[in-house]
Amino acid sequence: MRLRDKTVLLTGASGGIGAALAQELAAAGARLLLQGRDRTRLNRLLAGLPEPGQHSIVVADLLRTEQRPALLQAVQKAGGLDVLINNAGTSHFAWLEDQAQEQISEQLALNLTAPILLTRELLPWLRRPGLVMNIGSAFGGIGYPGYSVYCAGKFGLRGFSEALGRELADSRIKVLYFAPRATRTTLNSSRVYDLNQALGNHTDSPELVAAQAMMALQKEQRQRWLGWPEWLLVRVNALFPGLLDRGLAKQTAVIARYAEHHCDKEAKS
Ligand SMILES: NC(=O)c1ccc[n+]([C@@H]2O[C@H](COP(=O)([O-])OP(=O)(O)OC[C@H]3O[C@@H](n4cnc5c(N)ncnc54)[C@H](OP(=O)(O)O)[C@@H]3O)[C@@H](O)[C@H]2O)c1
């Protein structure tokens, strides 16, 4: 899709990947509705975009039912939508037994339920042709120790994207799943960066991820996995999960050392 003069709603616009993507979209001439929870951060982002007057901000917590209508109202005010990008997300790197019920519920609510509900609410306002891009993760294709809840959300989001895309096959609305690998943003704690360094896993910049997301939008790529080893591993995992079981089993002790709480317990014992 050509993005010039298209209306795009971007959730999580104030975050690392969101802010970089907002810059790319604005540079391509799109009109942006930028969602986040922090008005100050959103206004700072807006002021740094080319032609800030073309765009607007929507302050809303996606986990607060009473705040979600603000998004629908912004879309109605804009007269409709061409692209919805479900990007807001959260992650908690910890062994399942060490996660509080609220942490589990919040991750699933923000990473899975919120994009499903928002998409349902905004579908009637999505023009044809239209795009929904769901920001997934490499962990939506590979179950990874320390990320069981995050993986549940991102695998779920991938299933949602695939099924909805097929449901809407005759409607000229396409549903895309875009899966970054580790990216340098505040989503990840220092433990995650230390783990990735210890394992030699690559970390991308949000600017690189945003540029790739733009290409995926422009080419309307149904699924896009960033990073060569991750792309391959997702496929190998789908066909021969036992191979990844064996590979990851060799790393699990190292991963456990970095996971939140697990290492605290070890230190105490
Ligand atoms: N960073 C990575 O390593 C990585 C890798 C693969 C996939 N991803 C995915 O990429 C997407 C963006 O991640 P990121 O790294 O840019 O994260 P980030 O820098 O932490 O930004 C998260 C964004 O989500 C918003 N948000 C958080 N909780 C919210 C809530 N309850 N209601 C509304 N908005 C909320 C934040 O808004 P506030 O400013 O209000 O907090 C912020 O704009 C996520 O879906 C993530 O799962 C990230």
Image (cartoon, rainbow, N blue to C red):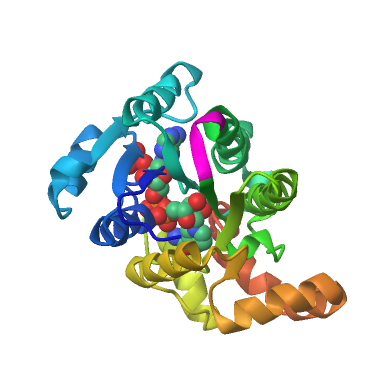
Identify whether 46 is placed above or below 93: above
- Quadrant including the C terminus: bottom right
Residue appearing at x 64%, y 52% in the figure: 154
Q: Is residue 87 visible?
A: yes
The front one of 246 and 22 is 22
* Quarter of the image where one finds residue 36: top left
- State the predominant SS element of the stretch in magenta: strand
Residue at 46% from the left image edge and 49% from the top image edge: 87
Residue 178 x, y percent position in the rendering: 55, 61
The location of residue 46, given as percent across then percent down, is 19, 45
- Viewer-nearest residue: 30 or 245: 30
The quarter of the displayed image where residue 44 is located: top left
Where does the magenta region start and end? 124-128
Residue 127 magenta-highlighted:
yes
Residue 7 lies in what quarter of the image?
A: top left
Residue in front for this viewpoint, 38 or 246? 38
Q: Residue drawn at (47%, 78%), measured in percent from left and top? A: 197
